[in-house]
Structures are given as C-alpha cells and as structure tokens.
Amino acid sequence: MKSANENIRNKKVIKQKFKCAPEKKLSVYFDLRYIINRIQEIRSCITGLRNYPNQKTIDKWINYQNAIIKLKDKYELVTSDNSFNFLDHDQFHRYLDELNEIRKQLRIVFKLELNIMEQEQIISSIKKRCDNYKDDQGRMIQSITEKEMVSISIEKIYKKDHNGNEVLITDENQVMEETNHHFQTVAGSVNRKKPIQGRWKEQYKPQPHINENIYSGIMNAPSYDEWLDII
C-alpha cells in the first residue's frame, strides 16, 4: 500500500459540505435564539426558586440583563425601561414578561430580514440565470431542471496488453485514450461515420415546406407591441 501511494498518482476527495439553512445567515436569528434560550432558562429558574435566589444566580441574571439591553438597542426594540435586581420571585416573573415581549418584537424583525434576504436571493438567482443563458448554457439547463450534473473521474485503468500481461495505466493521456477506446467499442461496434440509407435519407434532407429563415430573428429584442401582447 505504501508503494502504491508513492508511485500511483491520486488525489484526496473532499466531502461536500452541507448548505446551512438560509435563516442562519442572519445575525438576528442567533439573537432570537439567545432570547428564547433565556426564556427557557428563566422558566426553569422560577420553577426551582423556592425562597430567595443566591448571589450567584442574581449576578448571572444581571449580566444577562446587561447583554439584552445592548441587544434591544441594536434592533431599537421598545419595551419597558425597568431595571430588575432579581432579588425575589416577583422580579423573575416580571423579567419573563419582558423577555416574551422582546421575543415577540425580534420575531417581527427576523421575518422582515428573512423576507428581504429571500428577495435578494431571488433577484440574484434571476440575474445569474440570465448570465448563464448567455455564457454558460449547461449550467442554466442544470438550474432549470434542478438536476445535478454528475461526472466520473477516471485516473487509473487496469487492462491486459496484447501479450496478455496485466498492466496498470496511470498516465493521464493514456487513460483518456483507453477510456475513449472502451466506450467506442464496448457495444461491439466501431464509432465511425455511417452513410444514411433507405427512407431515412429522404427524412434528413432539407424540407421544402420549412422556412429556412424561421429562426433568423430569434435574438432580436421584442417590440413594444409584443411586450403588450405578453402582459
């Protein structure tokens, strides 16, 4: 195996990364998740809070509150201006109401930004498809049909030579030649020009009833009247 790795050319195959969900490209998505997590945490805290919170819990929620105040300023959210000290059970309940209101407003911001991003992606995709129509028709067809073009990379060929000896071909040019030869002869025939005979000969002749200039103006810009007919 070591000898094969040293003498046979090979390349690493990189596993394709999965595309992330579109909403995860928005920072507001993660800010919204942060608020939702704090809501879940404060609910658990309220459930487990019997008397008064300890100092560690108080300090933690004061730090949360400071971070959330910055988040409110970032998105210009309008909620109460109350500052909570988290010294008793009631303070946690009131702050839960505050967090629910922040979540409600952040969801609106998130939906707006997601809609804007989707519209921008649609416009970008349309422009890209138009560019592909001009410069890369293959990619355009792939996009329209929503089918991924799959190709096979052949880097080595194992065969028997004319003397019956087994050989491994790794030279790039030889690999291409052998691959072409295989697909040209695999069906038991030779790939060459064949004369058209019989009734097919007449079928492939230019047909007099078809106007040979029918597509001559296909790339011309549509007229104003044609646009109106389409609309």
Image (spheres, rainbow, N blue to C red):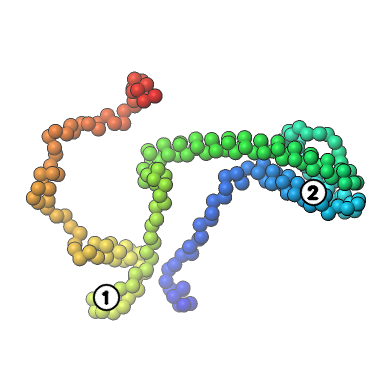
Left or right for 60, reference 116: right
Q: Which amino acid does label 2 sit on?
A: Ile
> Residue, x 43% and y 73% (percent of image)?
7
State the image coordinates of residue 31 (x, y, percent, origin top left).
70, 44
Residue reaching furthest to the top: 225
Q: Residue at x 24, y 62 (%)?
A: 184
Residue 177 in view:
no
* Apparent side of residue 187 relative to residue 141 in the rendered image (left or right): left
Q: Is residue 170 above or below residue 51?
A: below
| Residue at position x 83%, y 54% in the image | 48
Precedes in sequence: disc 1 or disc 2:
2
Residue 25 percent location from the top left of the image: 61, 45
Examine the image and state in which quarter residue 226 appears: top left
Which residue is drawn at the image coordinates 45% and 36% (left, top)?
127
What is the spatial separation of the Cα atoms under label 1 and label 2, in whole angstroms? 76 Å
Q: What amino acid does circle 1 point to?
A: Asp
**Residue 86 lies in what quarter of the image?**
top right
Q: Name the residue under label 2.
A: 42
| Quarter of the C terminus within the rendering | top left
